Structure formats: C-alpha cells, structure tokens
Image: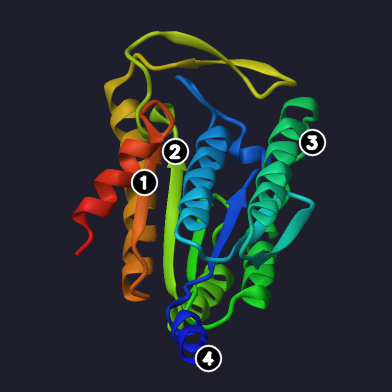
Amino acid sequence: RPFTKVFREERERPVIIGVDQSHNMYFGSQVAFKSVVAAEAAAIICWTTVDNGDRVGGVVFTDNKQELIKPRRSKRSALRFLNALADYNQQLVESHTTNKSGYLLQALEQMYRITKPGSNVYLISDFTDYDEACGRYIQQLALHNSMTCVLAYDALEENLPRPGVYSITDGNTRSAIDTHTRSVRELYHQNFDNRIRTLQDTLLRLKVPLITVRTDQVVMEQLETWKQKTP
C-alpha cells in the first residue's frame, strides 16, 4: 500500500490555469467574445484534469483584481475555479472601467506562488499586457514545469472587414472606421502578424508552445488540433 501511494505522487501532474478576464478580452466581432473563448478553453482543461484524477487550481484575473484557487484534487475545487471564472466573466458585462496595465504580471506572480515543480501550467490571454517582466516569470515557470500559453484573438484583430465604413464602439463612445484603402488593410494585418510572430519567437526561445484560439471557431476543435500536432 505505501508503494502505491509513492508511485501515484510521482506521477501526479497538478494543473495550474491562469485565465485573463480583463477588459481587453471583452471584445468579439463574430460568435463569441475573447473572454468567453478563454473561459471555455479553461473549462475544458479543468474538467480534463478532474477526469485524469489530478489536482487543479489557478488564477482568474482582471485589470484590477484576481482570485487565487490553490490546486486540489476534487470536483469542489474545480467548481470553485469555474464559479470564479463565471463571476469575473459576468462582471465584464456589467462594468466598463478604464484599462490598466501590469495585471498580467501580477497574475503570473500568483501563478508562480502556487505552482510546484512538475506541474502543467496554462496561461490563457490575448497577451495585450505582455512585457519583458512577464517573459521572465514565464521562463521561471517553464524551467521546472510544462508551460503552455493560449492566445485568444478575434478575426477582426487579424484583418479589417471588406472595404466600407463601419461603426465601432467600446461600450462608452462610438466612432467609425474606413477600410476602403488597401494599404491600410495590409498594414493592419501586418501589424497583427508581427505581434503574434514576436510573441511566438519569444516563447519559442523559452521552449513554451503557443496555441492560438480564434473567437469564431470551435474551441474544443482548436485545442484538439494542437494536441494532435504535439509529439
């Protein structure tokens, strides 16, 4: 019996999930918001962990606050994490505050605090708030754990819509965008492509894979496609 316990502890892979529910994530032009897609990806990872009999916990965070759930091997712990996620997601609908910076770094600090060596760590965000300090924490987490980053993005962030004049709003103010100029559309796409490529290259140097999840595509299928490509 003691040997069985030791064997289980050696094989155990606690899962830590960091989920971004900041106001930058409250955006979506088709099907779903980035915040919803991020929550769905987190839920899939969470329940997969429960099914595998491993501990699950993490950090749900916004621009100005965060909730820390220490990893435990129980459905109650998983439900506490998912309830916090649902609450934070609903708060995005109910409030429109000014975006702040530094929240991604603060979340990574909390994730680092509760992560023990040998864990599987997932960070789900649009990485708008990513900087070099965040990279250093990701590097530390990746040293003794399996670290994966999941980028949630919207089709409208990648490409402007077909030529026309479109009304846009942030929930408080309204403006218009003119997409008739081809060079503007190409520059817009290039800027997005450069941002993603820079993030991918940075994480690649840290040996951290980056999964991209788009708001107008089925989350489960996108995660499965990545899993099938992983050796």
Q: Give the residue type that dot 2 points to.
A: Tyr
Provide the residue designation for mark 2.
Answer: 153
Please say if the residues under marks 4 and 2 sit with CB atoms less than 8 Å apart.
no
Residue for point 49% across, 57% down: 49
Residue for point 53% across, 55% down: 50
Provide the residue designation for mark 1.
Answer: 212
Q: Is residue 2 left or right of residue 88?
A: left
- Looking at the rendered structure, the secondary structure element under dot 2 is strand
Q: Give the residue type that dot 3 points to.
A: Thr
Provide the residue designation for mark 3.
Answer: 97
- Looking at the rendered structure, the secondary structure element under dot 1 is strand
Please say if the residues under marks 3 and 2 sit with CB atoms less than 8 Å apart.
no
Q: Residues within 10 Å of mark 2 (few under 14, many from 20)?
A: many
Cα separation between marks 2 and 1: 7 Å
In the rendered image, which quarter is residue 96 located in? top right
Where residue 2 is drawn, which disc sits there?
A: 4
Q: Along the polypeptide, which appears first: circle 3 or circle 2? A: 3
- Looking at the rendered structure, the secondary structure element under dot 4 is helix
Q: Along the polypeptide, which appears first: circle 2 or circle 1? A: 2
Cα separation between marks 4 and 1: 43 Å
Cα separation between marks 3 and 1: 27 Å
> Where 113 sits versus 225, above or below?
below
> Where 187 sits versus 3, above or below?
above
> Where 192 sits versus 143, above or below?
above
Instruction: From the top left corner, tell me how far across and down residue 76 is, in percent.
Output: 70, 52
Please say if the residues under marks 2 and 1 sit with CB atoms less than 8 Å apart.
yes
Q: Is residue 220 left or right of residue 140?
A: left
Instruction: From the top left corner, tell me how far across and down residue 73 is, in percent.
Output: 61, 64
Instruction: From the top left corner, tell me how far across and down residue 153 is, in percent.
Output: 44, 38
Cα separation between marks 3 and 2: 21 Å
Q: Is residue 66 left or right of residue 27?
A: right
In the rendered image, which quarter is residue 18 located in? bottom right
